[in-house]
Image (tube, helix red, strand yellow):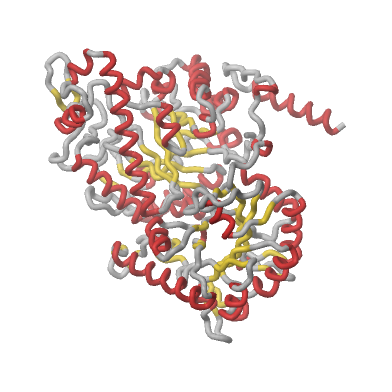
């Protein structure tokens, strides 16, 4: 009876999806033999392991101020892991796998316990001995160092001293072969003011803002503060246990590249975040963990563990900070609150957030929304809005940044277009006015802007804007011509274009140059913010649909898929002058072109248009029903991840009531 009802429900849902799509392309039939296996049916990647993050453990009430679970629940969870084929591993085994000495068993799991509660000594250790399971215990030094009978300031909550362990407990457990003592900072487990608006962000990963002086910590001040902290906790654990700590555990899971470098200099070999997914012994600088909180039932615990390998569906709102900014601070705060509420209510996963100002809408960037050394700051706004979105709306924020279109002073060389009729070269003002990627001065200044973004703001990823392109007549600047000659090309675009083979190699050379520059920018950001920073890059539709058009853009889908965590095609039919009655067929063709590359759909997020820029006034806005139809078409064609640009949260465009049930991964969770 159940199976028959289930089959009927699936048929009804399928019929509703198909009949609701108007002129949508029908979904393509894939035979069972050709269907991709479920993620759960795949073997675990070699040397991968699951990490579970616990905090306090209580016999009775599981106090969520300390993210506690009950002792009985922890025992049941360990037993469930054991009985379902999970194999406990230690920090030493993971390091041995990293060094190529061993291979971790299938379904390896590491238990970790943060903060340094006394319950690890009184409740967890007996369970570890009973099950013979290893664990990592990472205390906060200043909490364990607190004098007897003196309350501990636990993030503003005054907590009885006996809630936390003593150094004698640390010493005893450090002698056990089942316990690895890690570090959770000495005294940096708190939120520090990180912008003029007063946002409290993890102190170990962000520069503090001093309201009295109106200034941020300098590089030297931040480095000295963190170095002192890392040195204190490292020396203390070493003196107490006789062994230097090897595992660094980030407070709140928030990482910093600068702090990671300091930790590595002190001998730490692995760093634990609270990012999603399985860990792998090949990459120990960014070890993700599953946070176990709210004292989950065994069923919910099992679901958390089982889903850790499932890819996360990406739903993106692409937001202009220009909509948020207002010279009136009261109105600006209303705008921010409205945006946060809309993103929260939409129940999406990501926001691509503009980090630059472009009130003229011409794509030439004259101001930024964060402190920096090269352009005026319109307002110190990006960090605040980004942190509000992360902490209140629970989304990942990608900083949407130009690559070349910064309007710096005239001394910095621009991309120049060669005119075949006159043989002259000049800046093409009909396009984005871009800095030449072959100018060392341009690269230095752009890199400096990205450094300042990473130092002064909080985000989870970078979206490289669509200004990173070069036409088949660009770049003809002196620096570019010199680079061509150095690479073995003629130093003359006319001669390059006359030879088809040289022209093809030149096209690839330019595509790779832009890729290499964004890679350098990515590494610059990760050096400061941490290795967990993800990347995405916009690509025009034509290089996806017609690979030979790489010559007109210097963009290549294969390059993008192999370089960035996410490739973001501009799936915008009207922008490509596709008639409305042919838009679904065009979207189907776009998705099909991406699908020709194995695994590409899992790394691609299609960006629809919510505005028809060919029109003016209120007619610009694309109806929510139309957007829903396009989203359904993407799904029917096999797309997994999608979003739209722009979101006008001020005027509810597109209408949330129209799009949410189809757009949101919460309301529409099919994968």
Is 404 displayed left or right of 110 in the figure?
A: left
> Does 95 appear above or below 398?
below
Quick one: 303 or 34, which is closer to the camera? 34
State the residue in front, 552 or 195: 552
Q: In which quarter of the image is residue 202?
A: bottom left
Q: Position of residue 238 (x, y in %)?
A: 49, 74
In the image, residue 231 sits, relative to residue 562, either above or below, namely below
- Residue drawn at 13 percent across, 40 percent down: 411
Q: Is residue 302 or residue 635 the one in the foreground?
A: 302
Which quadrant is home to the N terminus?
A: top right
In this view of the protein, can residue 142 be seen by the observer? yes
Asked if residue 135 is positioned above or below residue 48 in the image, the reply reads below
Q: Is residue 621 visible?
A: no
Task: Please indicate whether residue 493 sits to the left or right of residue 581 in the image.
Answer: left
Count up the numbered dots: 0
The picture places residue 54, in percent across and down from the top left corner, at 62, 62
Tell me: 634 left or right of 229. Answer: right
Which residue is at 82% across, 30% downward?
Answer: 5
């Amino acid at each position: 009876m159940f199976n028959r009802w289930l089959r009927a429900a699936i048929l009804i849902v399928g019929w509703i999806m198909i009949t609701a799509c108007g002129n949508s392309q029908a979904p393509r039939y894939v035979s069972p033999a050709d269907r991709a296996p479920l993620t759960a049916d795949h073997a675990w990647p070699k040397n991968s392991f699951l990490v579970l993050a616990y905090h306090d453990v209580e016999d009775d009430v599981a106090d969520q101020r300390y993210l506690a679970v009950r002792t009985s629940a922890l025992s049941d969870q360990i037993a469930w892991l054991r009985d379902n084929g999970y194999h406990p591993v230690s920090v030493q085994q993971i390091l041995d796998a990293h060094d190529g000495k061993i291979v971790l068993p299938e379904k390896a799991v590491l238990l970790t316990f943060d903060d340094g509660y006394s319950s690890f000594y009184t409740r967890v250790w007996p369970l570890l001995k009973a099950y013979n399971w290893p664990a990592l215990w990472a205390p906060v030094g200043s909490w364990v160092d607190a004098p007897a009978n003196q309350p501990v300031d636990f993030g503003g909550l005054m907590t009885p001293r006996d809630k936390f362990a003593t150094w004698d407990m640390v010493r005893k457990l450090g002698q056990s072969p089942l316990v690895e003592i890690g570090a959770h900072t000495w005294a940096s487990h708190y939120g520090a003011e990180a912008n003029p608006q007063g946002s409290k962000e993890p102190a170990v990963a962000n520069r503090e803002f001093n309201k009295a002086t109106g200034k941020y910590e300098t590089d030297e001040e931040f480095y000295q503060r963190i170095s002192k902290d890392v040195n204190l906790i490292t020396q203390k654990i070493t003196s107490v246990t006789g062994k230097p700590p090897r595992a660094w555990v980030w407070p709140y899971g928030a990482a910093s590249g600068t702090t990671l470098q300091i930790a590595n200099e002190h001998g730490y070999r692995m760093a634990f975040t609270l990012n999603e997914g399985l860990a792998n012994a090949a990459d120990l600088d960014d070890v993700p963990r599953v946070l176990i909180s709210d004292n989950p039932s065994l069923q919910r615990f099992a679901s958390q563990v089982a889903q850790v390998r499932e890819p996360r569906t990406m739903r993106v709102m692409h937001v202009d900070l220009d909509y948020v900014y207002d010279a009136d601070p009261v109105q600006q705060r209303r705008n921010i609150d409205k945006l946060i509420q809309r993103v929260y209510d939409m129940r999406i996963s990501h926001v691509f957030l503009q980090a630059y100002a472009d009130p003229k809408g011409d794509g030439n960037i004259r101001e930024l929304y964060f402190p920096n050394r090269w352009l005026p700051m319109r307002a110190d706004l990006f960090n605040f809005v980004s942190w509000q979105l992360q902490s209140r709306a629970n989304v990942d924020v990608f900083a949407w940044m130009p690559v070349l279109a910064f309007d710096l002073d005239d001394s910095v060389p621009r991309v120049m277009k060669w005119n075949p009729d006159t043989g002259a070269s000049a800046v093409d003002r009909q396009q984005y006015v871009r800095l030449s990627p072959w100018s060392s001065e341009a690269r230095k200044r752009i890199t400096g802007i990205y450094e300042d973004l990473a130092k002064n703001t909080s985000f989870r990823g970078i979206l490289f804007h669509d200004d990173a392109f070069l036409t088949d007549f660009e770049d003809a600047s002196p620096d570019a011509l010199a680079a061509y000659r150095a690479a073995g090309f003629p130093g003359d675009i006319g001669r390059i274009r006359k030879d088809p083979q040289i022209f093809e190699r030149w096209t690839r050379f330019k595509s790779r140059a832009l890729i290499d520059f964004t890679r350098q920018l990515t590494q610059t950001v990760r050096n400061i913010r941490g290795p967990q920073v993800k990347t995405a890059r916009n690509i025009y539709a034509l290089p996806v649909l017609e690979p030979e058009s790489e010559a007109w853009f210097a963009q290549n889908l294969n390059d993008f898929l192999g370089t960035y965590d996410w490739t973001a095609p501009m799936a915008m039919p009207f922008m490509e002058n596709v008639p409305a009655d042919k838009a679904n067929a065009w979207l189907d063709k776009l998705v099909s072109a991406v699908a020709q590359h194995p695994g590409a759909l899992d790394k691609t997020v299609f960006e629809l248009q919510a505005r028809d820029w060919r029109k003016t006034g209120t007619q610009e806005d694309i109806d929510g029903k139309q957007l829903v139809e396009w989203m359904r078409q993407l799904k029917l064609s096999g797309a997994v991840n999608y979003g739209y640009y722009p979101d006008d949260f001020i005027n509810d465009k597109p209408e949330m009531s129209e799009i949410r049930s189809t757009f949101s991964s919460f309301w529409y969770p099919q994968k």
